[in-house]
Image: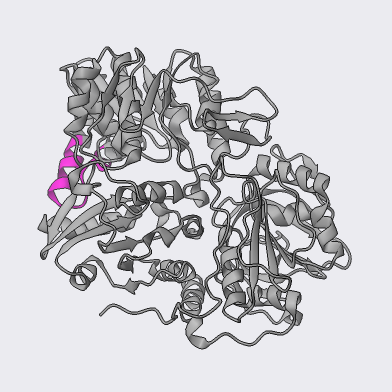
C-alpha cells in the first residue's frame, strides 16, 4: 500500500519474506509468522494496514473460519478484491499477515478470536462485526464466557459506529450486542442451550418456547430478526425466500451462510449474486474435506467443544438429520474415528467430553485416537459405546473396510491428521 | 492392532439411562429411570445452572459404579424451576459461573429441599461453585460476599489469581480414598470452621488456597476439582456409595481397566 509509512512498508516486506520462508520450508502455512515478524518492526502495523479499508470482523465460539470464508465469498460477488485470514489465524499477527498480503484490497474479512475482539475493534475500526454464538470452549483459557460477553458489550457501547450482524437466537450474543447502535438481527438458530439458562443481564431464569427466549424477570428477550434461517431456506430482510443449497454440510453451515448474506447486504451485495458464490465453497481450511487414503474416503470434521460436537454429529448423520449434500448424506453405519488432544490450543482440560452425548454413535463402528484417547475410552465406556483404540490415522484407516471413514477431531488432533493425510491428498 | 476395551456391556442392570440432556420446551416433570421402593436415588441439583464443564460425568460414573454392583438406581436431574426432592440418597452439585451460582444459591435457600436432605443424613457431593455455595458465604460477580446455604461450615472469597490446571491431592487417610487427580479452574479461596476437615492435602495445584483441598463434615463433601471429578477418582465415587448404602463389593477388574489406565496416565503426566 503506497500510503503506508516507511517503517510499516519495511515491516510488511520483511514479514512477507518470513511467510514465504515458512511455506517453502513446510513449517507452516505462513499465515502467522509473517505477521509476527512484521509486528516486531512496527507494533502499530495492524492499525496502519487497516486504515482506509472496509473491514468486517467475524467472531464467536464456533463457525468463525467457515463464516469468514462465506462472508469473503459473498462480498467477493461485488467484484473487488477481499483480504482475509482464511486459515483461522485469528490473532493480531494473523490479521496483519492477511492485510499485508492483499495490500490493495478495498475490503477485508477478518476472523477474530472472541477473547480479543475489543482490541481488534480498536485497531481495525471495522464497518461491520459478525457475532455468531458463545458457548463453553477451552475453559482453562477463557475463564467464563459471560465475562467475554460483558467485554464485548462494553466495546460495542464505546464504538457506536460499528454495525453488528448478530444471532438473535443466542441470548449471550443478543445481550452483548444490545449495547450497539445498529444491529441487524439474524434468526440463525441455536442448538446448544446449556450455556444460556440464565439471563445474562439480571441472572434470572430464561424461558424458551417456539417463539424464542425471554427472561422471566427483566425485559431481555429475543430481538425480532430481519434475516431468518428457516429449514433449508434463507428469508432475507425483504421477506424473499430462497433455498440455500450449499455444498457445505450440516445445519450450522446454513446458519453461517445466512449470517454471511446478511453482512454482505450491508455492503450492497445482492443475494442473488452472493448466494451462488457461497454454494461454491465446499471445504474450509481442510474442514469438510473428503480425502482418499488407501482406498478409504476420509471425511474430515473439526469439533472443538460440546456445541461443535453436536453440530458435527449432525453432519455425519448421527442425529438423524440428513447432511447438506450428496457427499455428506446420512450413512449411519459408516465407521467413525474420534481424535482428541489437550494441547494449549485445544484446552488442557478434557472435562467437556462429558458434555457430549456419544450415545448417538450407537450402532456405528467407533475408533478412538489422539493424545487423550484414554479419556475418550473412559467416556465411551460409560456411554456403552464399543470402540477400538488406534495409534494414529493410518492405523484407523487400516482397521476399517474400503469405503467411507468419518473423522471428528479437535484442534491439534485435526492438524496432525491433516499433516498425515494431506500428503496423500 | 486395535485394542478392544475390556468391559462387556451386556450385564443385567448395567444399562441405566442418565437423564437430563435437557431440551428446552420439554415438560418440566423430573425425568426418571429405574424405580421401585428400594432404588438408590441420585439427585443432580440444577444441571441448568450448575453444569459448567462436564459435571454430568459425576452422575454418570456414580450411576455406573452402582449399577455394575447390581444396585437399582434412580437418577434424577432437577432443574432450578423444580422442587428439590427430600428423599434422595446422594445429591450432586456441579460448577457454575458467577450469575448462575448466585441464582442457584437463592433458589436452593428458598426451596429448602437440600437442607432437609442433609438433615435426613443424605450424602452431598459438590464441586467448585457447588462446593462454595454449600458454605456460609462465597464471592459474587464483583467479589462481593453472597450468602450461601450454610450446610457446611466453610467461607469462600475471591483469591489473588485464578488457579487453573491439574490438581493432585492426598486424601485424609481416615476416608480410605486413593490420591486425587483432577482439574481445577477457579479463583476461590476457602477456609473451614471448627469441626470441618479438609478432604485432602494438596500435592500439586491450589485447592482451598492454604495447602488443603476440599472439605467434609459428616456426609457432606466438597472439592475444588471441577467438572467430572469422580471420573478419575473411582474410590471417591465408591466412598459416596458406601456412605449411602454401606460396604460394597469390589468391581470386577475388567470394569476398571480404562479408568485405572486414565488415572495412572494423568498422575504420571503431572509428575514427569
Residue B91, relative to residue A140: is it above or below?
below
Left or right, A351 with respect to B177, comes to left
Residue found at x 43% / y 16% = A162
Image quarter where the N terminus of chain B lies is bottom left
Residue A125, relative to residue A59: is it above or below?
above
Residue found at x 79% / y 56% = B114
Q: How many marks?
A: 0
Residue A241, relative to residue A31: is it above or below?
above
- Relative depth, front residue between A243 and A401: A243
Left or right, A255 with respect to B51, comes to left
Q: Position of residue A133 (x, y in %)?
A: 45, 35
Q: Position of residue A140 (x, y in %)?
A: 51, 52
- Relative depth, front residue between B51 and A285: B51
Q: Position of residue A405 (x, y in %)?
A: 22, 61
Work out whether residue B191 can be spotted.
Answer: yes
Q: Position of residue A65 (x, y in %)?
A: 31, 38
Question: In the rendered structure, does residue A33 fall within the stretch colored magenta?
Answer: yes
Left or right, A361 with respect to B111, comes to left
- Relative depth, front residue between A336 and A286: A336
Work out whether residue A46 can be spotted.
Answer: no
Task: Name the image colouring.
Answer: one colour
- The residue at the far right in this view is B194
Question: In the rendered structure, does residue A245 fall within the stretch colored magenta?
Answer: no
Please report the bounds of the magenta region as a residue range. A16-34
Residue found at x 12% / y 48% = A24
- The residue at the far front in this view is B36
Amino acid at each position: 500500500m503506497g500510503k503506508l509509512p516507511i517503517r510499516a512498508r519495511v515491516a510488511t516486506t520483511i514479514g512477507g519474506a518470513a511467510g514465504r520462508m515458512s511455506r517453502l520450508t513446510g513449517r507452516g502455512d505462513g499465515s502467522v509468522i509473517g505477521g509476527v515478524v512484521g509486528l516486531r518492526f512496527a507494533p502499530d502495523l495492524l492499525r496502519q494496514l487497516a486504515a482506509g479499508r472496509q473491514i468486517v470482523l467475524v467472531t464467536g465460539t464456533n463457525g468463525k473460519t467457515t463464516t469468514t470464508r462465506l462472508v469473503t465469498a459473498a462480498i467477493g460477488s461485488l467484484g473487488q478484491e477481499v483480504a482475509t485470514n482464511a486459515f483461522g489465524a485469528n490473532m493480531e499477527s494473523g490479521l496483519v499477515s492477511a492485510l499485508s498480503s492483499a495490500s490493495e484490497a478495498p475490503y477485508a474479512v477478518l476472523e477474530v478470536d472472541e477473547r480479543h475482539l475489543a482490541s481488534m475493534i480498536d485497531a481495525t475500526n471495522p464497518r461491520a462485526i459478525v457475532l455468531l454464538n458463545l458457548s463453553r470452549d477451552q475453559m482453562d483459557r477463557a475463564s467464563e464466557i459471560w465475562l467475554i460477553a460483558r467485554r464485548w458489550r462494553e466495546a460495542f457501547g464505546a464504538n457506536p459506529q460499528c454495525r453488528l450482524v448478530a444471532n438473535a437466537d443466542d441470548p449471550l450474543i443478543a445481550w452483548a450486542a444490545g449495547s450497539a447502535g445498529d444491529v441487524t438481527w439474524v434468526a440463525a438458530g441455536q442448538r446448544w442451550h446449556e450455556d444460556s439458562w440464565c439471563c445474562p443481564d439480571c441472572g434470572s431464569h430464561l424461558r424458551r418456547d417456539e417463539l424464542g427466549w425471554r427472561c422471566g424477570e427483566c425485559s431481555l428477550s429475543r430481538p425480532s430478526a430481519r434475516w431468518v434461517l428457516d429449514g433449508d431456506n434463507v428469508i432475507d430482510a425483504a421477506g424473499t425466500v430462497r433455498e440455500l443449497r450449499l455444498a457445505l454440510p450440516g445445519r450450522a453451515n446454513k446458519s453461517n451462510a445466512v449470517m454471511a448474506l446478511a453482512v454482505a447486504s450491508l455492503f450492497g451485495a445482492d443475494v442473488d449474486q452472493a448466494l451462488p458464490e457461497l454454494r461454491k465453497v465446499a471445504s474450509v481450511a481442510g474442514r469438510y474435506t473428503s480425502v482418499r487414503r488407501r482406498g478409504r474416503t476420509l471425511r474430515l470434521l473439526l469439533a472443538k467443544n460440546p456445541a461443535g460436537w453436536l453440530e458435527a454429529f449432525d453432519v455425519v448423520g448421527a442425529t438423524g438429520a440428513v447432511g447438506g449434500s450428496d457427499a455428506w448424506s446420512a450413512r449411519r453405519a459408516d465407521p467413525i474415528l474420534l481424535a482428541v488432544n489437550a494441547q494449549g490450543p485445544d484446552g488442557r482440560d478434557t472435562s467437556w467430553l462429558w458434555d457430549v452425548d456419544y450415545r448417538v454413535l450407537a450402532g456405528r463402528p467407533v475408533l478412538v485416537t489422539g493424545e487423550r484417547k484414554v479419556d475418550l475410552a473412559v467416556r465411551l465406556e460409560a456411554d456403552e459405546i464399543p470402540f477400538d483404540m488406534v495409534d494414529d490415522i493410518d492405523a484407523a484407516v487400516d482397521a476399517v473396510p474400503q469405503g467411507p471413514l468419518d473423522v471428528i477431531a479437535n484442534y491439534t488432533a485435526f492438524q496432525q491428521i491433516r499433516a498425515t493425510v494431506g500428503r496423500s491428498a | 492392532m486395535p485394542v478392544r476395551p475390556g468391559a462387556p456391556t451386556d450385564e443385567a442392570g448395567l444399562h441405566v439411562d442418565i437423564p437430563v440432556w435437557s431440551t428446552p420446551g420439554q415438560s418440566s416433570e423430573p425425568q426418571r429411570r429405574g424405580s421401585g421402593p428400594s432404588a438408590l436415588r441420585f439427585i443432580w441439583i440444577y444441571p441448568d445452572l450448575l453444569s459448567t464443564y462436564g459435571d454430568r460425568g459425576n452422575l454418570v460414573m456414580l450411576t455406573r459404579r452402582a449399577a455394575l454392583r447390581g444396585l437399582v438406581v434412580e437418577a434424577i436431574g432437577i432443574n432450578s424451576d423444580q422442587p428439590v426432592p427430600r428423599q434422595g440418597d446422594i445429591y450432586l452439585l456441579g460448577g457454575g459461573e458467577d450469575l448462575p451460582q448466585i441464582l442457584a444459591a437463592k433458589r436452593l435457600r428458598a426451596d429448602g429441599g437440600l437442607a432437609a436432605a442433609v438433615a435426613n443424613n443424605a450424602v452431598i457431593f459438590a464441586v467448585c461453585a457447588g462446593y462454595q455455595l454449600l458454605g456460609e458465604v462465597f464471592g459474587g460477580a464483583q467479589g462481593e460476599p453472597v450468602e450461601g446455604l450454610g450446610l457446611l461450615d466453610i467461607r469462600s472469597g475471591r483469591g489473588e489469581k485464578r488457579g487453573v490446571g491439574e490438581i493432585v491431592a492426598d486424601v485424609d487417610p481416615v476416608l480410605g480414598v486413593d490420591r486425587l487427580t483432577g482439574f481445577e479452574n477457579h479463583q476461590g479461596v476457602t477456609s473451614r470452621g471448627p469441626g470441618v476437615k479438609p478432604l485432602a492435602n494438596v500435592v500439586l495445584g491450589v485447592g482451598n488456597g492454604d495447602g488443603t483441598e476440599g472439605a467434609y463434615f459428616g456426609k457432606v463433601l466438597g472439592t475444588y476439582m471441577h467438572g467430572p471429578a469422580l471420573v478419575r477418582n473411582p474410590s471417591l465415587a465408591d466412598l459416596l456409595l458406601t456412605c449411602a448404602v454401606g460396604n460394597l463389593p469390589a468391581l470386577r477388574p475388567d470394569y476398571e481397566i480404562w479408568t485405572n489406565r486414565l488415572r495412572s496416565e494423568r498422575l504420571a503426566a503431572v509428575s514427569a
